[in-house]
């Protein structure tokens, strides 16, 4: 009987312990712990309802009285745990009101939802961008398969079509000559080392069946089969030919020898592009082809001046000894689109400075005179000279003479800027007067310039304005054939 009572007491203590533990876990895991109805403005008890907490406390005291030593220790441990948790909860409640704690949990949920939605939208944007890039790549690939469109060139049969080599054909004058000969229907081969020439000057012909571009320095021999040769290879502006004077001399001597040797081997007709600089600072005005010139052989410009003079000497030596069919063109100041922006010439300097509202700089007093021809007129003259039977040097230039001061004012007015014109110290060996006598060109090849200065300058200004605004390679050099009809040379 004693044993059964002891068993019953242990069973009762175990049951009470289980009950307290369950109550402890229920109260610990309840997120609304400590939030009674009274804290939301409701009544907790009515007059008819007893206080459950008092009843629970009385039951706990009775249980402790009835329990033995072991049971009392278990119950004491449970009470201490409950009391410690109560202290912790009371401190948390003092630090943060229960309502704000509930709202904070809701805010965390909303923040998680917002972060998830934001990340989802970013992923969608990245995916859309990737698809756009993929489509652009496919479009470029398809465009590469489409044959390029070229200007409608004249068709020539094998009897009339010529194979023409242009040394320096990617330069300013050479590229315009390429355009003319391509439009005439000839096969054109350009050899250029790209020192001053640029591939984009002729890029609109790349891939055409009648066009070929060779990266080659004419100082080294070239072995190809051609019918005509235009030898234009040489830097022509003072900053460029003074940059490497030895190379300039080699181009105009060794290069000319290689060109004349090629012409001798294949029986080609060759045109040598000489310059008005062979007259130096002239004592005769205007300068006829019979004037021998006034050149300083050891001055800073001598590498170009004397190089061209030797080039002419070599041409007529080959003509006399080797029976090479030669032509010599003495080119005066020329301007137009595709000029190098930093070539240091008068036209490019003035236009760039005016477009950028900078001061227009004149070297010297501004009383020096020059004669300017548009590049299409020069091309017309070169082709006419090559087609003729005249073998003596011919001046190709505009006989209309203007001072540098007047020229600067004209460009400033055409651009519409308010740039000031300032004078800088004169350049050494700078010619004071320059005007061609073109009576021989009029008589022998029936040529004279036709493009007015204002019209040519406007085209050149438009070109430089576009170049200054150009910011990427996609702004291509679109070639539009000249609307002006060239002279029929047949």
Image (spheres, grey):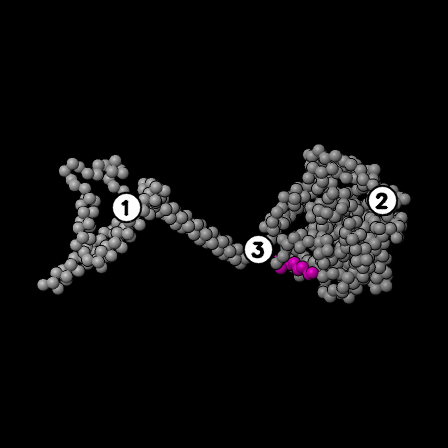
Q: Is residue 387 above or below residue 345?
A: below
Foreground pick, 480 / 119: 119
**Structural crowding at the residue carrying mark 2, measured as other residues with C-alpha within 10 Å and reported as few (<14), some (14–19) or many (≥20):** some
Q: Is residue 85 left or right of residue 182?
A: left
Q: What is the number of the mark on residue 141?
A: none
- The answer to whether the residue labelled 3 contacts the one labelled 2, judged by CB atoms less than 8 Å apart, is no
Please provide percent x and percent y for residue 102.
32, 43
Q: What is the number of the mark on residue 431?
A: 2
Residue 296 at least partly seen? yes
Look at 71% across and 48% down and name the residue there. Answer: 340
Q: What is the number of the mark on residue 33?
A: 1
Please provide percent x and percent y for residue 22.
23, 54
Q: What is the number of the mark on residue 148?
A: 3
Q: Is residue 109 left or right of residue 225?
A: left
Label 3 element class: loop
Foreground pick, 360 / 295: 360
Disc 3 from disc 1: Cα separation = 79 Å
């Amino acid at each position: 009987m004693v044993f059964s009572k002891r068993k019953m007491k242990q069973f009762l203590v175990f049951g009470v312990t289980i009950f307290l533990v369950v109550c402890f876990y229920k109260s610990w895991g309840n997120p609304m712990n400590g939030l009674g109805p009274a804290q939301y403005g409701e009544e907790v008890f009515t007059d008819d309802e007893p206080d459950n907490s008092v009843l629970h406390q009385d039951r706990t005291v009775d249980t402790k009285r009835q329990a033995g030593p072991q049971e009392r220790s278990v119950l004491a441990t449970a009470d201490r745990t409950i009391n410690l948790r109560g202290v912790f909860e009371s401190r948390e409640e003092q630090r943060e009101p229960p309502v704000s704690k509930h709202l904070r949990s809701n805010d965390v949920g909303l923040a998680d939802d917002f972060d998830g939605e934001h990340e989802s939208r970013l992923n969608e944007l990245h995916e859309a961008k990737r698809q756009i890039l993929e489509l652009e790549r496919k479009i470029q690939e398809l465009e590469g398969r489409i044959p390029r469109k070229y200007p409608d060139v004249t068709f020539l049969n094998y009897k009339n079509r010529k194979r023409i080599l242009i040394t320096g054909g990617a330069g300013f004058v050479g590229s315009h000559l390429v355009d003319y000969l391509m439009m005439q229907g000839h096969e054109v081969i350009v050899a250029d080392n790209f020192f001053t020439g640029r591939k984009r000057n002729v890029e609109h012909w790349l891939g055409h069946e009648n066009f070929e571009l060779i990266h080659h320095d004419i100082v080294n021999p070239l072995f190809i089969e051609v019918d005509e040769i235009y030898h234009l290879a040489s830097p022509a502006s003072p900053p460029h030919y003074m940059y490497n004077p030895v190379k300039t001399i080699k181009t105009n001597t060794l290069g000319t020898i290689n060109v004349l040797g090629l012409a001798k081997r294949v029986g080609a007709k060759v045109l040598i592009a000489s310059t008005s600089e062979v007259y130096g600072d002239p004592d005769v005005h205007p300068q006829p082809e019979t004037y021998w010139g006034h050149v300083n052989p050891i001055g800073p410009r001598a590498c170009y001046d004397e190089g061209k003079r030797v080039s002419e000497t070599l041409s007529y030596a080959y003509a006399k000894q080797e029976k090479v069919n030669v032509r010599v063109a003495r080119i005066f100041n020329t301007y137009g689109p595709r000029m190098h922006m930093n070539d240091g010439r008068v036209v490019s300097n003035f236009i760039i400075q005016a477009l950028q509202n900078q001061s227009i700089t004149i070297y010297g007093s501004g009383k020096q005179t020059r004669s300017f021809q548009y590049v299409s007129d020069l091309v017309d003259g070169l082709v006419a000279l090559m087609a003729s039977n005249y073998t003596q040097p011919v001046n190709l230039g505009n006989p209309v003479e203007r001072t540098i001061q007047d020229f600067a004012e004209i460009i400033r007015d055409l651009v519409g800027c308010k740039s000031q014109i300032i004078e800088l110290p004169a350049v050494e060996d700078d010619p004071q007067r320059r005007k061609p006598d073109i009576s021989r060109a009029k008589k022998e090849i029936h040529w004279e310039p036709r493009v007015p200065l204002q019209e040519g300058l406007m085209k050149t200004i438009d070109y430089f304005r576009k170049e200054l605004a150009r910011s990427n390679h996609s702004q291509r050099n679109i070639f539009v054939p000249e609307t002006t009809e060239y002279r029929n040379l047949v």
